[in-house]
Structure formats: C-alpha cells, structure tokens
Image (spheres, rainbow, N blue to C red):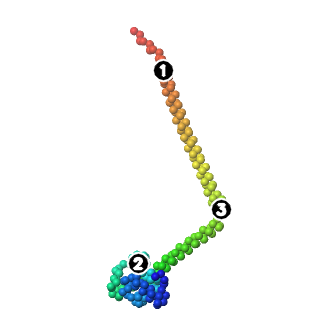
C-alpha cells in the first residue's frame, strides 16, 4: 500500500488491494479501477495516497458529498472516484504530488534548512572574535562602567539629600525643645507678689 505500482500487473494488484479494503470501490472492480487510476499511479501515487485523496481535499479538509454504498451501481462508483480525484488535479489536468511525496519533500526541506543553519553557525564560530577582544564587548563594558558610575553618583546625591533633611529636622526639633525648656524654667521660678493697691 506504500509502494508505487509500476506496470499493468502491479497496478492491477494495487487496485485489488483497494477493492479489498474499500467496499465502495469493490463495486467498480479492479480492472475498471486500474483504468481510472492509471494516470495517478504513473504520477507516483501509492494505493494509500489514493485512499487519502478519496477522503480529503489537498488542503486536508474532508471531501464533501455522498459516498456510494457497497450495493450502488458501478457507474456511480466510477463517477464518485472521478469526482473525488478531480480535486487533486493541477491547472494542466495532471495529478498533484501525492501526500506521501509532499510529506517527504517537506521533511527534506526542513532537514536541508537545519543543515544550512548548522553550517552557518559553524562558519560563524570559526570566524568569531573572542569576546575579550571584540570591539563590541569593550564598548559594552565601558557602557556598563558608565552606568554604574552614574548610579553611584545618584545614590550619593540621594544620601546627601536625606542627611540634609534629617539634619534640618533635628535642628528644628532642638530649637523647639529649647523653647519648651525655657518656658518651663520661666514657669518654675517664684513670682514676686504683686503690690497691694493703696487704700
């Protein structure tokens, strides 16, 4: 089912296998089915590709429409096969690449892209300048030093402002305390008695 049938005998055997696994296709018969699928087999399709195409459109969605029953007229089955496979024709009425080949081609493309990326990475590592010697690394270190120095200056300025604020608060509190102390001392001193008014 995964091999491309080559020649009359292999194509007939492939169609007999299709008739065995699909009661719908059994009504058409392996001889007539081989005639219908000859173009597809010659384009590199396997029996498994044919079964997939009868159920799906090239985008992967399910084919719309009714499926003939096992008791349907053979001509209805032939029309069903033609209609379903029509979705897999290109602009020149030739079969599109089968699903298995599309998967294999996509896999080859992915592997080739990965190999190219790996070769490019290896090439870059061979010509790369050691980090300690690169101009960008020296610039990055200088930028980091400048940023650290700016942060130190900011922290120092913030600390100085905080110390100044606390000193001002302490001075204000000491002045307030001195006023209260002076007031308490004045209240604690004995007062001279007021002279009595003359009679």
Residues at discs 2 and 1 in contact (Cβ within 8 Å): no
Q: CA distance from mark 2 to mark 1?
A: 108 Å
Q: Nearer the viewer, mark 2 or mark 3?
A: 2
Which circle marks residue 188 in the picture?
A: 1
Bin the neighbour count of mark 3 within 10 Å (Cα to Cα): few under 14, some 14-19, many 20 and up: few
Query: What residue did someone put label 2 on?
Result: 56
Residue 183: percent from left, percent from top: 48, 24
Residue 167: percent from left, percent from top: 55, 36
Q: Residue at x 43, y 76 (%)?
A: 59
Residue 24: percent from left, percent from top: 36, 83
Q: Earlier in the sequence, mark 1 or mark 3?
A: 3
160 vs 30: above or below:
above
Q: Residue at x 49, y 79 (%)?
A: 101
Bin the neighbour count of mark 2 within 10 Å (Cα to Cα): few under 14, some 14-19, many 20 and up: some
Left or right for 9, reference 73: right
Q: Secondary structure at mark 2?
A: loop
Q: Earlier in the sequence, mark 2 or mark 3?
A: 2
Give 191 or 14, whichever is nearer the viewer.
Answer: 14
Which circle marks residue 9 in the picture?
A: none
Q: Secondary structure at mark 3?
A: loop
Query: What residue did someone put label 3 on?
Result: 130
Q: Earlier in the sequence, mark 2 or mark 1?
A: 2
Q: CA distance from mark 1 to mark 3?
A: 83 Å
Q: CA distance from mark 2 to mark 3?
A: 55 Å
Q: Which quadrant of the structure image shows residue 95?
A: bottom left
Left or right for 109, reference 26: right
Residues at discs 2 and 3 in contact (Cβ within 8 Å): no
Q: Nearer the viewer, mark 2 or mark 1?
A: 2
């Amino acid at each position: 089912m995964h091999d491309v049938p080559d020649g009359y005998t292999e194509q007939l055997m492939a169609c007999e296998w299709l008739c065995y696994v699909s009661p719908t296709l059994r009504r058409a018969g392996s001889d007539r089915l081989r005639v219908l699928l000859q173009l597809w087999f010659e384009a590199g399709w396997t029996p498994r590709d044919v079964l997939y195409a009868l159920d799906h459109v090239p985008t992967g969605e399910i084919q719309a429409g009714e499926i003939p029953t096992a008791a349907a007229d053979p001509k209805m089955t032939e029309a069903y096969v033609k209609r379903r496979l029509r979705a897999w024709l290109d602009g020149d009425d030739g079969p599109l690449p089968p699903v298995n080949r599309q998967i294999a081609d996509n896999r080859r493309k992915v592997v080739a892209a990965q190999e190219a990326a790996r070769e490019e990475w290896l090439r870059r590592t061979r010509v790369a300048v050691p980090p300690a010697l690169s101009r960008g690394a020296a610039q990055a270190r200088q930028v980091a030093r400048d940023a650290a120095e700016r942060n130190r200056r900011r922290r120092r300025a913030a600390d100085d402002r905080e110390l100044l604020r606390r000193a001002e608060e302490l001075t204000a509190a000491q002045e307030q305390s001195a006023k209260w102390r002076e007031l308490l001392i004045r209240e604690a001193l004995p007062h001279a008695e007021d002279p009595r008014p003359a009679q």
